[in-house]
Image (spheres, coloured by chain):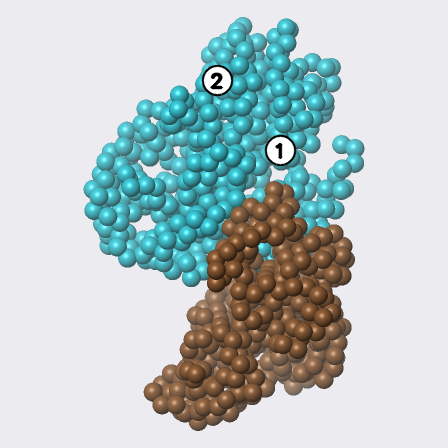
Chain colours: A cyan, B brown
Amino acid sequence: MSRSPATGPTGPTGAPYDVAVVGAGLVGAAIARDLAGARLRVALVEGRADVGDGTSKANTAILHTGFDARPGTLESRLVARGYALLSQYARATGIPVEPTGATLVAWTDEELATLPSLAEKAARNGYDACELVDADEVYRTMPALGPGALGGLTVPGESITCTWTTNLALATDAVRRGADLLRRHEVTGVRPDRDGTTTLDTTAGEVRARWVVNAAGLGADVLDRRFGHDRFRVVPRRGELLVYDKLARPLAPRIVLPVPSKVGKGVLVSPTIYGNVMLGPTAQDLDDRTATGTSEDGFAFLLEKGARIMPALLDEEVTAAYAGLRAAVHVDGALFEDYLVDVDAAQRYVLVGGIRSTGLTASLALAEHVTGLLAAAGPGSTGLDLAPRADLPSPVTMPNLGEAFPRPYADADAIARDPEYGRVVCFCERVTAGEIRDALASTVPPADLDGLRRRTRAANGRCQGFYCGAEVAARLERGVVSRSGPA
Amino acid sequence: MTAPRHEQVAVAVVGGGPAGLAAAAALAPHVDGEVRVLDREAETGGIPRHSDHTGYGLRDLRRLLTGPAYARRLTDRALAAGAVLRTHATVTGWTPDGHLEITAPDGRTTLAAGAVVLATGARERPRPARMIPGDRPAGVLTTGQLQNLVHLHHRRDVGTRAVVVGAELVSWSAVLTLREAGCRTALLVSAHAVPETAAPVRLAARLGLGTPVATRTRLVAVEGRDRVEAVVLEHVGSGARRRVACDTVVLTGDWVPDHELARLGGLELDPVSRGPVVDTALRTSRPGVFAAGNLLHPVDTADVAALDGRHVAAAVRRHLAAPAPAADGARLVAQAPLRWVAPQLLRAGDPAPPRGRFLLRCDATVAAPVVEVVQDGVVVARRRLPWAAAPGRVFRVPSVLLRDVRRDGGDVTVRLAPR
């Protein structure tokens, strides 16, 4: 558990937190970071053992321009704003971003006919840079595209980034600003107290706070009901993805997007920030909020689509296959197609739900929005002084996981300063002993192998542990053991 | 950023497994200049380092050693011959000039070499590559990871009850390793009608270990939250499925060459085996770059890889003495059920391949195979071989069968005569 000097679920004096943010995914971490930038005592309460272990780790990691949002929605506004804020934050923290651009490819006459209306919708979303291109131009920019493309619509600003580094940067900044990160604290009950605070019962004890922010993602409706509401239902939507070998990267210089159509959802082919190529996602509504398994049908669907979009891709080895659950939200039995943000001043409770699939891009904008709503209500009403502190620490510098940018194994200076950056442990991803050591000693260290993978790329490569699995596990174990002494 | 240091050697061998070490041992006494082996692991020796059972060294050392002892023996021989062995040295790519880029604790280096031998071996395909759907719990691993854990890291907490996918030699090696770690193997699962290992080995294994083998069976799903709880098996013929409870799944065999450097270097690759195309002297498509071992023929036994290493030395020495462009050659192609063949190029004046054998993979079990060699529509050789062709192991064709192929003729097909 990572803590600032003010330890304990209610701080050294037993005083309650000003705000408890439930959920340390992208949205919760961003909100906690913003609030911790004011003169507030913030708890970031996470049910799992690590931050960003839910939906936030399994998205497509695309930094969305928002060109295809529903115009006029809160989502549309916050994705556009979030694009700017996250681009800026990435520059400040070293989160890798590659502006690959995207092209929507039309494979049928119906799809081709739709493109102009998509450009027009983009303009209504405030995005003017889309361009209609003909088939020749589509193939010029993407020679490996399968035959049959009729034309396309470019989205030059659509970019790829690292969702794990973003989530960790936000959580780390929150902690460095003084927030208490409380991991393995799953909320099991909510009890309002008479003194204007709320007690959250959790699996690791009580957390008392004046205000509670619900950024619990897949569990947001359950938490919302604990506050006595019955206004929405989370329907998990599973998306399966295949990640192809880095040697396939030259095939996919840009994001290839499907044209949304009545027939059904297409899949995208996209380069990843780690140098791979991803194919997916599927979209399947489920009942089980923990069903992150992959399926035979999902694989078959992806391979069929992939064979059409980029046949040469299927000649490459699959490095990873995973599934993520998006929290689609149903209100009154129908899909609700916007964010669900609500400030309940009487309960001192903020709901930040229905983030669907744009939480990465919108995270900082959602935080700004929530802070803005609380500020607008006024400290007399909220009891929260949201004036920013003057003495904020500078943003964290995150280790670079992006293949297009310098990494320690290739940095002669870094190795000269510290030979452990020359000792490659994960050969496929070129992850060094120094990076693994740094992750284990970081402000928000990993709790398990998956956490170490998300912080370093170790064991994420084509051999999937054939060469490195035992060594990586051994280093993780030593690192966790050496930290389990007194804080 | 500081530029990497630049060094120059006579021969750079990438990969310090049996093929690389044997090549270095064969070259170092005869080469003017340094023969340097680069291995990214902590110690040289390759896969045998952690394959802790006997059976190693038969064809090259005429001995029977355990894997670790074999690894040490080949290491000592390379050192005694005067080769320089660098460990923790990871070759990450090539410079535009064709020099090797290396990362090591002592820094970044670009290494120029008169000749480069790629001996980077092969790995078992892991679960995602095999497209096995289901939950993604801990406890699914390849033999490589298993043996690293048990023999190099001395773990005994691998699991308690395993299902092993594959019934090749390496699969039984996995069963032995599991037993050493206190993990029972409940079942081996083979997609083929007949388990892949040769009958005598199979019988001995069954007698010694008593592990049942489910044939014509494939693994179609893994179940479990944090840890494996069960696998779902499907019978290939009937489609019938069943669950088998276990906490460990070992994926064995299904080897792919570690060809990243070959691809980054622009070498021509065999589209089926995915290893670099080589001639019988083991030259690749790039002058001055050679290849040996399981990178070429995933996989044959370690001693065969070592003999590749010995074999390539002659061509390397000739290249160092007088680099000359290679003559055109006839391309050799395998026809189904033969999957791939290595080496793939037949040039006039070249030696026979290592051990006088072409190595192939066959996707069907054929007890008494009749091999035919066809060029320009004419059968130039036909012979019944006294050994079977079967999936999951290498099928060897004596090179004498290709003696009469015209090196300046059209493509050559090697096939099994229909029954």
Q: Chain of mark 2?
A: A
- Label 1 or label 2, whichever comes before in sequence order: 1
Badge 2, how many Cα within 10 Å: few under 14, some, many 20+? few
User: Left or right of A286: which side holds B179?
Assistant: right
**Label 1 to label 2: alpha-carbon separation:** 25 Å
Q: Does residue A51 appear anywhere in the picture?
A: yes
Tell me where residue B244 appears, x and y as whole percent. 61, 52
B337 versus A5 height, above or below: below
- x, y percentage for residue B200? 66, 78
Residue A30 tag number? none
Q: Provide the chain ID for the residue under circle 1.
A: A
**Residue type of the residue flagged with mark 2:** Asp
Figure quadrant of the C terminus of chain A: top right
Q: Residue at x 41, y 43 (%)?
A: A282
**Residue B332 image offset from top left, x and y in percent:** 43, 81
Of the pair B346 and A200, the residue shown nearer to us: A200
Secondary structure beneath label 1: loop
Q: Judge the density around disc 1: few (<14), some (14-19), many (≥20) Cα neighbours within 10 Å.
A: some
To the question of a shared chain for discs 1 and 2, the answer is: yes
Say the numbered circle drawn on residue A230: 2
The image quarter in which residue A80 lies: top left
Relative to the observer, which residue lies in front, A170 or B359? B359
- Looking at the image, can residue B32 be seen? no
Please report the residue visible at 42 percent of the width from the left and 61 percent of the height from the top: A315
In the rendered image of this protein, does residue B297 appear above or below residue B212?
below
Amino acid bearing label 1:
Arg
Quarter of the view holding residue B110: bottom right
Which image quarter is the N terminus of chain A in?
A: top right
Q: Nearer the viewer, residue B174 or B75?
A: B174
- Number of the label disc, if any, that sits on residue A48: 1
